[in-house]
Each structure stands twice: as structure tokens, then as C-alpha cells.
Image (tube, grey):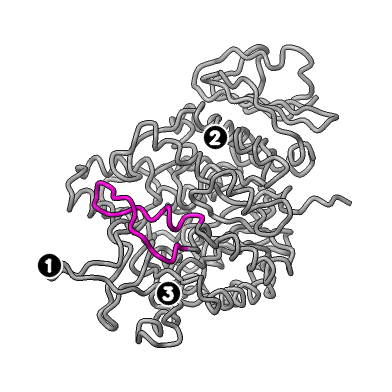
Amino acid sequence: MSNTPWWKKSVIYQVYPRSFADSNGDGIGDIKGITEHLDYLAKLGIDVIWLSPVYQSPNDDNGYDISDYRAIMDEFGTMDDFDRMLARAHELGIRIVMDLVANHTSDEHAWFVESRKSRTGEYRDFYWWRDGSVAPDGTRLPPNNWRSVFSGSAWKYDEATDQWYLHLFSTKQPDLNWENPRVRSEIYDMMRWWCNKGVDGWRMDVISLISKNVALPNGELGPDGYGDFGPYVVNGPRVHEFLREMNREVLSHYDLLTVGEASGATIEEAKRYAAADGSELSMVFQFEHVDAWLNEPAPLVDKWGVGRASMPRLRAILNKWQVELAGQAWNSLYWNNHDQPRCVSRFGDERPEWRVLSAKMLATCLHMMQGTPYIYQGEELGMTNKHFTSLEECRDVEEINIWHQAVDELHQLTPEQMLDCFDHVARDNARTPMQWDDMANAGFCPDGVEPWIDVNPNYQTINAAAALADPDSIFYYYQRLIDLRHNLDIITDGVFRPLLEESEAIWAYERADGEHVLTVGCNWTDVEQPCDLWDSNAGEALICNYAQHKPGVLQPYEAYVTLR
């Protein structure tokens, strides 16, 4: 029997509950809606669901502001609904990975409610409280100059105790103080509670930020007048100590998949987070490839722009992660998630004549690499970004805040420029409702009900019902990729070797295990490209997104994989 951990051969599907399926007609996705579509996911062949937060929350940041870690958000249903979903998923052989949000809570969490009451209360040190200062004109100034990820200061003044609290994200998301051992103990106890319920792992939100430099020094100023907290927070001084403790106290006692969202993680840091000795996590999400566009060209303001990463740049980044992590840590493989725009719009070609081919090409390029692939809901249908026509269509706090800063206050961008940025990189692109069929509201919620965020108008042609009826659809192509991963050990274990690294158009590589060689070639353009990878001893064709591969070339957006 293989000693390979189950999560190395798994394919994970992310469900964003608010946008997946509405079972009770209130325009908001819910847990019963997920349960009703588990057979669809079983048909796709996935092994694991990563479930974005379903905990009790005021919903300032779509559930990533948790007010009770052991309760279910009212809009999503009840704990009984969750238990039934978990049981049904397990019946179908699908594991459930929860979202652990432990860098911050909601300001409505009982810990913070108590913390803000008094400077001497028992929960005061659960969060980062500090004195500010007063400018000569009487203006209150925060403890340091840090910028929030969601724009503006990372500090909020609280009159009750005349101090400021740290919030790296929304003002309603105060950061937990992991220096306090009681905080860590409470988090670990909560994790054990869910593990004992039967969940199969954790995706750990912004886990690379849990340790701060306790001096909280000012950061380098940006053009908006705020400082960068990155050097003092990202991969902070005690983060690995904390994760090793978490592993000893919780993770090592269960058979879990753990993946840490590690913004700012270098390859060297990733080798520590996801060390092969199992002392911390199974794997991390790195962001180097999805941030590659920031240098091609530079954003118009902050992270907002309309740039597109070139294929050679993307290839260089992901090839580097494949080669340098080999044997030392495990890769996570993804193109998009709830925080990233749709991959066929961002990396592929959403024009009608190329959308399906380019979506299949992107899938092939990623799924043949070494690591655990993640599929974001609707990716298997080739869902695209949505065109935004006004701020009123947006729901994400990040988009609303940057609009007020960059358009209304600083006049850095016009409304038209900001909307163009939203079309390219806004998180709401990934959060439009799942497109189930061509009926009203894409089958996400009943006719006559207003969904919490607008459905993408192209649902009448891009939807699950149409995909299931078409044997050549993107859905069935993903199904074949998943089946190959389950049945060919070379995809899990084979050594990764880059090929054709000078090509401006073709991304190619091979995987080798000593007995066989798997060769992958992907044309990232809408023009036929000469390619001699298979001129001799081509081997068995495993998968191709065209009905017929033409010798000596790769057709527009063609993906071709052989095994010899």
C-alpha cells in the first residue's frame, strides 16, 4: 500500500457558499444548496471541498469576519444542515476542508466585545491595543503609519478606552494577538472541536500574518501617505514557531490536509511552512504567479490595473516553484479562487471562439504539474469575469474602499478607469453566482428573487446544464484530467523538467519517474505554432483539447499530453 498522503493525489474544489446555490429562495447561497449539488461534484470526480467560511458573521468581509467560530451563519442555515452536508459528502467519498480564519475575528466576537470594555479586562490582550498621539492641531494620530489591505489606516480609534486597535483588513476585523498564549489555546481548542466533528482539514486564511514584530515600527511610506506593514508582519518573527505548536497541539493528532494562504512567501519560506517532515503544514498558497501582472505594466494605483502577465513570466515563476520545491515541500496548484479573477479571462482568451479551447489548455498546463490542484467553482464551466458598469454593482469591501480612496478622495483614477480595473482584477469577478442553467438567475436562485450579487449575463450560454449535455465540454475535460491524476502515479511523483524555455508561445515540460516520461505542450496563443516535441517516439496520447493533434505543430490554444 502506498505511503503517499491522500492529499497528494487529491483534486480540491473550492465552494464559495454565498454564490454556489440558494435552496431557500432568499438570493443567498447556503449549505443545503451545497448538499443538493454534491452529486454534481462527485460526477466531476473531485476528492475534497474547500469550504469558504460558513461561521456566524456580520458579513462585513463575506464571512471572513467571524463572530462565533462554533456556529453557522444564519443566512447559510444551521449546524444540523452542516452535519448533513458533511455526512453526505463523506458518503460520496468527498472530504471537507474548512476555512480557518485566525489572524482576526469580527469586532462583534465575544472576545472583542469584552476586550474593548476596559484596558485591564481579561480579554484586553487578545487583540493589539495601543496608544496613539495627538497632532498640534488636535487631530488624533494612530500608533503607527500602517496601511490596511482594504485602504486607509490599519488602526481604528476606540473612544471607550481612548486607545487604537490594529486591523490589517476591515475596521470590523481586529487582529488577534498571537503573542498571547491564551489566544493560541482558544484557537487550538476550536480546531479540535471541528476535527472531532469530522472535518478533514484546514485552509488557513492569511496565516503568514499571524506573527507581528511587537515593536510595530512605521513602514515605508507609499504615495497615499500610509506605510507598508509587510516587513514587520508578513512571515513574521514567530510564525513558524506558532505553526509548529499548532501542529503538535492539533494537526498531528488527525489525518488532515492543511494549506496556508502565505502571501509574500518565498520559496525558502514555503520550504519551512510545508516542510516534507510534516512539522507545520501540508502545503501553502503562494501568490507570485497571480501577482506577476503587477510588473507588466505597473498598476494604475496600488494593486489596481488592467495589466496582463506574459506567458514567459508566468512560466518562469511556476517552473521555478516546481523545480525548487521538489522533494522538500509540496506545491498547491491554482489559477483562481474567491480572491482572484476568473482564469479564462485573466490568463486565457474569453472570446467565444477561443474560450473553451483556452480554458482546457489552462487546465492541462496546471493539472499535469506536481502538486495538489485546486478548482474554483465554475472554473470547470469556463465562467468568465463580469463587466462592471457602476460601483453599485460591487459588493466587496475592498472594491468599495479603493473607489472611495482613489476616485472620490485622491482623484487618482476616473470612475471609468476604476471600473476597467474592476473588470480585470476585482474579487467580485469570482463571486458572481454559479451558473447552473439557462433559466432565470442561472438557476442559482428562483425566478423573481434578487441574488445578493448580479449574475453574469452570459449564463444563458455558459452553464452547468449545457456542459453536462455536451460530451466535449470543459466539465468533461476536467473530469478526464482528474481521472488521469488518480490513475497515473507519474503525475504525483514524476520529476518535473522544463522544456522549450525560450519559446514565447509554448509552455512545455515533462514528468519522468524512471520508467515513463509524460510530455506536456501548451500553446498560449491564438496562432498555430511549430512544435517538434513529438517528432520521434511520441508515445501514447493521453489527452488533447482538439479532436486530432497535427504532427509538427500545436494548434491555437492546443494542449497535448503523451506518455511513453
Q: Nearer the viewer, residue 1 or 481?
A: 1
State the separation of the CA atoms marked 2 and 3. Answer: 37 Å
Residue most toward the left? 137
Q: Is residue 149 above or below residue 122?
A: above
Q: Mark 3 sits on what residue?
A: 127
Q: Secondary structure at mark 1?
A: loop
* Type of amino acid at the residue the image marks with label 1: Pro
Which of disc 3 and disc 2 is earlier in sequence? 3
Q: Mark 1 sits on what residue?
A: 136
The answer to which quarter of the image holds residue 238 is: bottom right
Which of disc 2 and disc 1 is earlier in sequence? 1
Q: Mark 2 sits on what residue?
A: 317
Q: Secondary structure at mark 3?
A: loop
Look at 35% across and 45% down and name the residue there: 303
Q: Given this view, does label 3 or label 1 mark the residue nearer the observer? A: 1
- Residue 216 image offset from top left, x and y in percent: 38, 63
Q: Which residues are magenta?
A: 212-235
Side of 501 where 279 appears, left or right? right
Residue most toward the right? 1
Magenta highlight: main SS: loop
Side of 481 where 219 appears, left or right? left
Q: Quadrant of the C terminus?
A: top right
* Type of amino acid at the residue the image marks with label 2: Ile
